[in-house]
Image: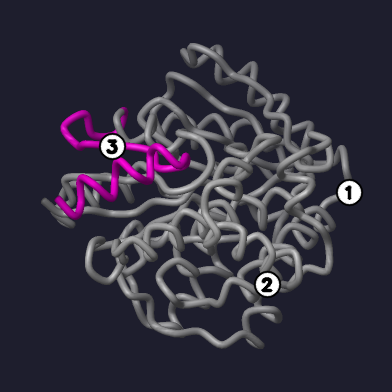
Amino acid sequence: MKRAFTFPGQGSQAVGMGKDLAEAFPEARAVFAEVDEALGQKLSTIMFEGPDDLLRLTENAQPALMAVSLAVIRVLEARGVRIADHAAFVAGHSLGEYSALCAAGTFSVADAARLLKTRGQAMQKAVPVGHGAMAALLGLDLDTARAVAAEAAEGDVCEVANDNAPGQVVISGATAAVERALDIAKARGAKRALPLPVSAPFHCSLMQPAAEAMAAALADVAMQAPAAPLVANVLASPISDPAEIRLRLIEQVTGVVRWTESVAWLTGPGGVTHLHELGAGKVLTGLAKRINADATASAIGTPADIEAFVAEVLA
């Protein structure tokens, strides 16, 4: 049995996230307190109580999702389940790469929180509100989605942002171009083409100012080799060298999240049989089952999930 730990990205946040962990485990409370202190804000209060519109702000959602994932890891570690011993690889969807790296010891919790606050703010500032958009194209393969984006661009930016699973591709770019892509996608056979409720066009070339901001932020942060290799979004293959990790995190801001290929690598050449999503929600667990129906996928985000997983692993 070979395991990989995966970490969710933006969109998995919900008011109340992490509250049950904080109530059940002192290790979780310590993580949330550390994040609050690092950011100089009561992010945990926003996580536990809302309001939803404040939690959904990119600069809050990103460190909040990391905090829940790290709370799960710290509780597991306290019970004898460690990445170095029990995971062959880590991977994260977009911001989830920071959670994965923090869990694997590359970043401290405080540094990861500050990096994600900076990342969220930089991504929001990169494009004026209303000038960028994202859309999910359902039922199209990756090549067709790329062709749709190229046809819709008409001199504007319109690019594939996320290859989440077979038949689920997200595009990103200028608002007018993304709106054109919706009709083109339907004409090309998409089952659905849906605008996404996001505040900025993530993972496209319009995010270049945010990539530059992250290059500056990452240059000042101490990084260690992760306890298990990271399967990087932009490569869909494993890396461990801190210098390369830094470069790939910068590239990731404007690059494609190659999640289908990443899970295919993990469950193919990587030899992984069990994928465990640590943190809020079950989005990656659902995607994993679509990418490889033969892989075992589970979400570990509640006290009951944690206790069951510990019992399974240490049996």
Side of 65 where 271 appears, left or right: left
Sequence-first tag of 2 and 1: 1
Residue marked by disc 1: 128
Could you tell me if the residues under marks 3 and 1 are in contact, i.e. CB atoms within 8 Å? Answer: no
Question: What residue sits 83% from the left and 62% below the top?
Answer: 41
Residue at x 24% of width, y 52% of height: 266
Residue 252, horizontal then vertical, whole percent: 54, 61
Badge 3 crowding class, 10 Å Cα cut-off, few under 14, some 14 to 19, many 20 or more, is many
Residue 259 at x, y = what percent?
40, 46
Residue 223 relative to residue 203: left or right: left
Left or right relative to 101: residue 114 = right
Query: Which type of secondary structure does the marked residue at label 3 adopt?
Result: strand
Residue farthest left in this picture: 1
User: What is the crowding at mark 1: few (fewer than 14 residues within 10 Å), some, or many (at least 20)?
Assistant: few
Three-letter amino acid code of the residue under disc 2: Met
Q: Between disc 2 and disc 3, whose residue precedes?
A: 2
Residue 305 painted magenta: yes
Above/below status of 249 relative to 263: below
Range covered by the magenta-colored residues: 290-315
Expressed as whole percent of the image width and height from the top left, the position of residue 175 reads: 78, 34
* Residue at disc 2, secondary structure: helix
Work out how far the residue at label 2 is from the one at label 1, CA to CA, in angstroms. Answer: 18 Å
* Residue receiving disc 2: 214
Which residue occupies 55% across, 35% down? Answer: 170
Which is nearer the eye, 211 or 82? 82
Pointer 2 and pointer 1: residues touching (CB < 8 Å)?
Answer: no
Q: Which of marks 2 and 3 is in front?
A: 3
Q: Nearer the viewer, residue 306 or 236?
A: 306
Closer-to-camera residue (159/155): 159
Compared to residue 269, the image places residue 113 above or below, namely below
- Per the image, the residue denoted by label 3 is 297
Name the kind of residue labelled 3 in the image. Answer: Ala
